Amino acid sequence: MLIPQIHKPRRERIATYSFKEPFKSPPMVLFSDVHLYGKLNKAISVPPENVRELFKLLQKYTDDGYELYGLGDILEGWRSNAKQILKYHPEYIDFLVKHVHIIRGNHDWTAWRRIEKKFGIKTEESIQIGPIYLSHGHKADPINRTAGWYSRYATKTAGLLKRAGINTDIIFRKMRGRSTPRLKALYRKHSLKLQTTIVPTASIFCYGHLHIPYIDTTLPETVVVNLGSIANHVRIFSYVEITQTELILWKITL
């Protein structure tokens, strides 16, 4: 009888940014777009093994003294309400409320309100730590900025199509791939606007939302980072680790 080989998750660097001066803060891990929903998350392209591996990593980083930041869309509040998410994922919610600084995203919708009240926590619209500014980033997306309802109903429609056997994930990834240069330009513009208005002391802008992991150093004094996502319908996800000397964008392949 053949015993199937068990592969350990493989971690590799996608990109690295080295700080010009030491980052004077505890080490950090940033992640986004978990989209916790339902029993197995199958309807919205989140492989359950990605969720399990992410939280295993987060626990290890917590044990090692890292601060954890969830940059939005941690919950899929447009497909489930907070009561359902609490029922299906009590262990993950317990970890999140105890160990993670939560930034709200557009898909979190109102789900965090019930959880905030139940556990006595507070979520944020954005957070700045030294030169690093953290937000979900959906306000840089022109569709979400001008028609926030679009993503809500697009998500519901995608779920219905998937149950009918039509996989919209491939189409979504192709569209994002073709739009990547334009989206990067939009996020550079958005970061510069923030830099000249509400966060003039920030120089590194970290976002989620796009599900496209990258570090953009096109601008001389402004670095734009997207964390990627675990909701990609594939057994690959990404996150960011920040130490005193560098920002590392990691990819995990299961």
Image: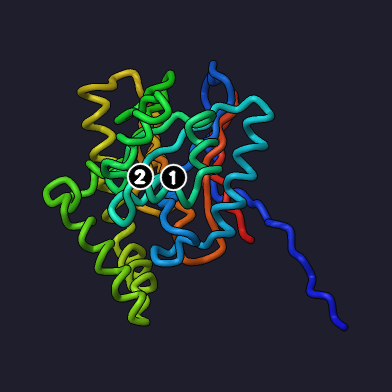
Q: Amino acid at mark 1?
A: Leu
Q: Quadrant of residue 245?
A: top right
Which residue lies at the image location 40% right of the left edge and 38% below the top edge? Answer: 71
Q: Residue furthest right?
A: 1
CA–CA distance between discs 2 and 1? 6 Å
Counting from the top left corner in percent of width and height, residue 181 is at 31, 56
Q: Amino acid at mark 2?
A: Ala
Colour scheme = rainbow
Q: Which residue is mark 1?
A: 86
Counting from the top left corner in percent of width and height, residue 233 is at 47, 66
- Left of 145 or right of it: where is 128? right
Q: Which corner quadrant holds the N terminus? A: bottom right
Which residue lies at the image location 44% right of the left edge and 37% below the top edge? Answer: 70
Q: Quadrant of residue 174?
A: bottom left
Disc 1, SS: helix
Counting from the top left corner in percent of width and height, residue 124 is at 33, 28
Q: Which corner quadrant holds the C terminus? A: bottom right
Contact, mark 2 vs mark 1 (Cβ under 8 Å): yes
Q: Is residue 221 something that shows in the picture?
A: no
Q: Which residue is mark 2?
A: 82
Which residue lies at the image location 37% right of the left edge and 67% below the top edge? Answer: 173
Q: Is residue 234 something that shows in the picture?
A: yes
**Mark 2 crowdedness (10 Å alpha carbons): few <14, some 14-19, many ≥20:** many
Counting from the top left corner in percent of width and height, residue 250 is at 57, 47
- Left of 34 or right of it: where is 18? right
- Left of 148 or right of it: where is 65? right
Disc 2, SS: helix
